[in-house]
Amino acid sequence: MAMDSNQSGSAFPALTSIRFIAAFAVVVSHYSENNLLPLPSAIFDFIDGGRSAVSLFFVLSGFILTFTYRDKLGHGGVRTFYEARIARIYPMILLGLLLCVPVVAYLLYTGDASLMLKWYAIKEAVYPALVVSLVCQLLLINGWFPFSAIKQPWNGPSDSVSCEVFFYLLFPFLLRRMTRMRAARIALVSIALWLATGVWIALLHAYMPISRSGAMIYSMPLSRLSEFVMGIAAAIFYLRLRASGTSQHVRGVVLIGVASFALTGLSAWRPVAPSFFLDAPLFAALILGLALLERPVVGLLNWRPLVRLGDASYSLYLIHMPLALWSLMLGFGPSNGWMVIVFCIVASLLCFKLYEEPMRRRLKARLARVMTPLSVGKPGQPVARPTHGMDSG
């Protein structure tokens, strides 16, 4: 779910705010599932257990990356893009795994087979499963494996980051191809990929055992690619509408109204599973509408504290499950689990300010020094290095 926090926060504060709202939906859903929060089933179902929130992250990621890199990648900045992506996502991956070490140590020390199964979905071959899961998470490929004993141990939510990594690998190619298309063709390609994803999901439901199909539908990168592409398409439409020089505020208000109404109806009805399949195009419309606004309509989304929480949403996403298991080890339960959520939110803000952002800048600079070859200059002239331009996360 990683995105460019600096760029999205400065250019689109409302889009940064909805990142926190989506992350919060994931947190309360996971805490409810782990008996840390007495969340009514009606609310849990309305927010789809946080699964649709991940769909919003993927669509938003495609939008923000397109807005940020539309010019840079057009001038050969692919290496810089990958450097920035590694610096953006990997420090928090490592911290999330580090926070999981006490949980793994506790499970191994106590030998509690029921907790090992409940928390990490491991029945047997505990040590090999933990090692394989750790390697997959370090390599960010865990989303490709439809096995709970690989995906769930350590920091389970990181499977969505493995989807993002796949999107990042494809992004320069997708951006170059899609920015050259006419609007009608972009819409056609997006719809075709979305429908193909629907067919793929239907085939998985029909021919794969439920123990495998769920993971392949919700976590496998191929199953989520259409959402990312919708975000790219929405960003291209945004850029072209803005380039027209005419006011797009009314169009934005209409898109927000229609998308919000439809999303609310789908959340209450849930006609199909997975629901994110129907939600994704509406998320693209909502994001495009919010970006097109020329003045705040939903003032809360521009509230500075909420924008700051949105900046820290990636930290929140990757620390909330380790801290949830910590709290269960310490005896927290439904009556006081809300305290853990508050602690997680505060910890995410501190983590963002003191660790995530400083490490991102440091790692980005280190990668630039290591990976950027010295250019050959004329005798007597200093050696030049390409500049990175605007800091984009």
Image (tube, rainbow, N blue to C red):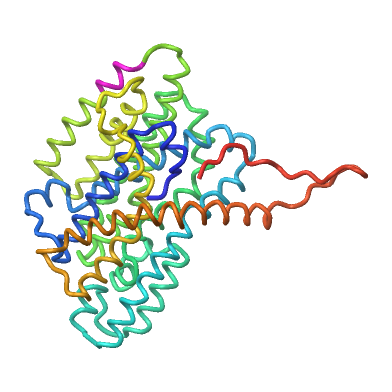
User: Could you tell whether 179 is left or right of 204 in the image?
Assistant: right
Q: Which of 96 and 49 is in front in this view?
A: 96
User: Looking at the rendering, which quadrant does residue 292 occupy?
Assistant: top left
User: Which percent across, then down, holds residue 143?
Assistant: 37, 61
Residue 251 lies in the magenta-colored region: yes
Q: Nearer the viewer, residue 222 or 256?
A: 256
**Quick check: can you spot residue 199?**
no
Prevalent SS, magenta region: helix
Image position of 295 with respect to 304: above or below? above
Q: Which of 197 and 297 is in front in this view?
A: 297
User: Which percent across, then down, holds residue 251?
Assistant: 30, 18
Q: Residue furthest right?
A: 379
**Quick check: can you spot residue 84?**
yes
Residue 111 lies in the magenta-colored region: no
Residue visible at 52% across and 41% down in the picture: 392
User: Which percent across, then down, holds residue 358?
Assistant: 51, 54
User: Looking at the rendering, which quadrant does residue 221 occupy?
Assistant: bottom left
Question: From which residue to which does the magenta span run?
Answer: 248-254
Residue visible at 52% across and 56% down in the picture: 359
User: Could you tell whether 105 is left or right of 68 in the image?
Assistant: left
Residue visible at 43% across and 59% down in the picture: 92
User: Which percent across, then down, holds residue 69?
Assistant: 53, 37
User: Could you tell whether 346 is left or right of 361 in the image?
Assistant: left
Q: How many labels does the image show?
A: 0
Residue visible at 46% across and 55% down in the picture: 356
User: Could you tell whether 166 is left or right of 302 in the image?
Assistant: right
